[in-house]
Image (cartoon, rainbow, N blue to C red):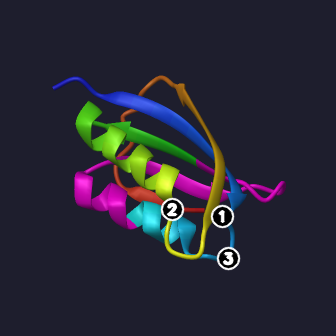
Amino acid sequence: MSQVCRRVIVHGRVQGVFFRDTVRRAAQRGGVAGWVANRPDGSVEAQLEGAPEAVDATVEVCRRGPRGAHVEHVEVSECEPSGATGFAVR
């Protein structure tokens, strides 16, 4: 099965609203590996690896965010799969 990797940076009111935990739960449900972290500028960054459909579904969760979040802009770029296993909140 081919794996894809996406780097996602989410801008808006996305810290302090359980954004990282929402992404973690979505990733684990879909079998997506990687990590999610708050950035000093107030955005949230994630690296997602897995089956294309599962990664795309997790990116969509990033575009919506949890209730309480206000997503203004999402940057998505390709990255090289590293063979990551598990999902970490940093």
- What is the x, y in percent for residue 27? 35, 55
Eyeballing the image, is 65 above or below 62?
below
Judge left or right: residue 16 versus residue 51: right
Q: How many marks?
A: 3
Disc 3 residue crowd, few under 14, some 14–19, many 20+, Cα 10 Å: few
Give residue 49's position: percent from left, percent from top: 38, 38
Which residue is located at x 42 percent, y 55 percent? 61
Spatial CA distance of label 2 from label 1 is: 8 Å
In the rendered image, the quadrant that contains the N terminus is: top left
User: Residue 48 falls in which quadrant of the image?
Assistant: top left
Q: Which residue is mark 3?
A: 16
Q: Amino acid at mark 1?
A: Val
Tag 3: amino acid: Gly
Residue 82 placement (x, y as % from top left): 43, 31
Question: Marks 1 and 3, Cα distance to the nearest angstrom?
Answer: 7 Å
Q: Which residue is mark 1?
A: 14
44 falls in the magenta region:
yes
**Who's the residue at 25% across and 61% down the image?**
29
- Residue located beneath label 2 in the image: 65
In the image, residue 4 lies at what x, y percent?
Answer: 35, 28
Cβ atoms at labels 2 and 1 below 8 Å apart: yes
Name the quadrant of the C terminus: bottom right
Disc 3 on helix, strand or loop?
Answer: loop
Instruction: For mark 2, give the secondary structure.
Output: loop
The Cα atoms of the two marked residues, 2 and 3, are separated by 12 Å
| Res 17 quadrant in image | bottom right
Magenta extent: 25-45
Is 28 magenta? The answer is yes
Residue 70 visible (yes or no): yes
Badge 2 amino acid:
Gly
Give whichever of 33, 56 is nearer the camera.
56
Q: Nearer the viewer, residue 53 or 90?
A: 53
